[in-house]
Image (spheres, rainbow, N blue to C red):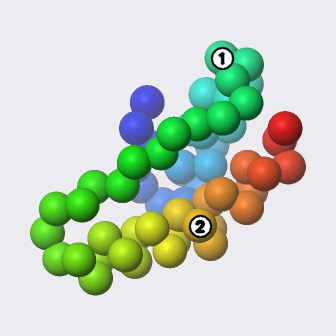
Amino acid sequence: MHPVGPPDRCVRRLRATLAGTGVRRLLLMVEGGGDPRRTLDNIHRLGRDVLPQLRCLH
């Protein structure tokens, strides 16, 4: 179920999970290994490119 890949793929997978399970909230985790700057970039990208597209679903 892990939404790994470009933002549009992550949005599609998370939307499918929300629709298929009926849950209203998800707990998302970000891989924290490696370069801390890349980890922070991933968190920023998640907040900028993925989550805004899911907010309108509930």
Q: Quadrant of residue 43?
A: bottom left
Question: Above or below — where is 34 with respect to 22?
Answer: below
- The x, y position of residue 36, in whole percent, is 23, 77
Residue 9 position in % (x across, y down): 54, 50
Tell me which label, 1 or 2, sits earlier in the chain: 1
Report, in whole angstroms, how far the alpha carbon at label 1 lies from the one at label 2: 23 Å
Residue depicted at x 53% and y 63%:
46
Q: In the rendered view, does 25 fall on the left or right side of 32?
A: right
Q: Secondary structure at mark 2?
A: helix
Q: Label 2: which residue?
A: 47
| Residue name at image x 36 percent, y 55 percent | 30
- Within-10-Å neighbours for mark 1: few <14, some 14–19, many 20+: few
Position of residue 42 in the picture relative to residue 49 (left or right): left
Image-quadrant location for residue 51: bottom right
Most foreground residue, 38 or 11: 38
Give the total number of marks visible in the rendering: 2
Quadrant of the drawing holding the N terminus? top left
Quadrant where the C terminus is found in the figure: top right
Does residue 9 appear left or right of residue 52 in this picture?
Answer: left
Q: Which residue is mark 1?
A: 21
Indicate the secondary structure of the residue bearing disc 1. Answer: helix
The residue drawn where x is 59% and y is 67% is 47
Q: Position of residue 20 (x, y in %)?
A: 67, 18
Q: Amino acid at mark 1?
A: Thr
- The reply to whether residue 11 is visible in this rendering is yes
